[in-house]
Image (spheres, helix red, strand yellow):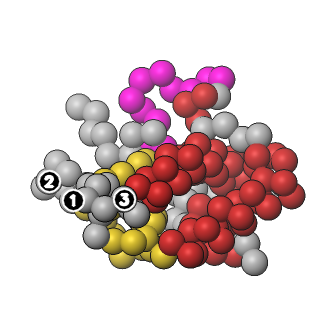
Amino acid sequence: MYWWVFELVTFHIPCFSFHPYTLHVHLSRRWAFFCQSLAEINITVQQLDEVGREVKLWSHIGGGHYESVTSGFRCVDFRRWFRPPDQEDPKPTRKGIALNLDQWVRMRKIVKAINNDHPVLAAALPCYMQDGHLATFECCECYPFLKLA
């Protein structure tokens, strides 16, 4: 039941070892980013039903992963982005999932169930709220496309 939520949050986690602790740290940080964006996504999805309302939400949920909700597309899109070497703006990849609004409602219920069943994930904080976070722009979870000179 949870497999596609787990896949959504963890797909292509850039870790050099698959030690369970390393995977847990990356998963919990992404989960925290994702859970923080839920309220904003819900508000934006509700605005899709308002006639004549222009809706555009593009929100970072960790690493090169973003979610978006846009007028004209009745879905919530979760996608990995990359920045081509010769361009400034990131571009979407084909790696991701677009949930229609019915699937989004089910997803919210699943997220609630996961948080209830796994209190460690529910209490997770994004990396920028943790002690020892890199105060500069060196965190690749927070700034995946930043080039430092």
Residue highlighted by disc 2: 87
Residue 126 x, y percent position in the rendering: 60, 38
98, 108: nearer the viewer: 108
Image quadrant in which you'd find residue 133 = top right
Query: Residue flagged by tag 3: what amino acid is it?
Result: Glu
Marks 1 and 2: in contact by CB < 8 Å?
yes
Name the residue nearer the viewer: 41 or 122.
41
Residue 62 makes an appearance in the image: no
The residue depicted at 56 percent of the width and 68 percent of the height is 104
Label 3 neighbour load within 10 Å: few <14, some 14-19, many 20+: few
- Quarter of the view holding residue 67: bottom left
Q: Does 73 appear in magenta? A: no
Tell me which numbered mark, 3 or 1, is placed earlier along the sequence. Answer: 3
Residue 93: image location, x then y, percent: 33, 70
> x, y (%) of residue 4?
63, 75
Mark 3 vs mark 2, CA separation in Å: 36 Å
Write down the region rendered in magenta.
Answer: 131-141
Q: Main secondary structure of the magenta part?
A: loop
Judged from the image, the secondary structure of the residue bearing numbered disc 1 is loop
Q: Residues within 10 Å of mark 1 (few under 14, many from 20)?
A: few
What is the quadrant of the C terminus in the image? top left
Query: Mark 3, mark 2: which one is toward the viewer?
Result: 3
Q: Amino acid at mark 1?
A: Pro
Vertical side of 3 occupied by 120: above or below: above
Q: How many marks?
A: 3
Q: Where does residue 116 sit, x and y in percent of width and height?
A: 84, 54
**Foreground disc of the pair 3, 1:** 3
- Residue at left offset 28%, top offset 33%: 148
- The local secondary structure at tag 2 comes to loop
| Residue at mark 1 | 84
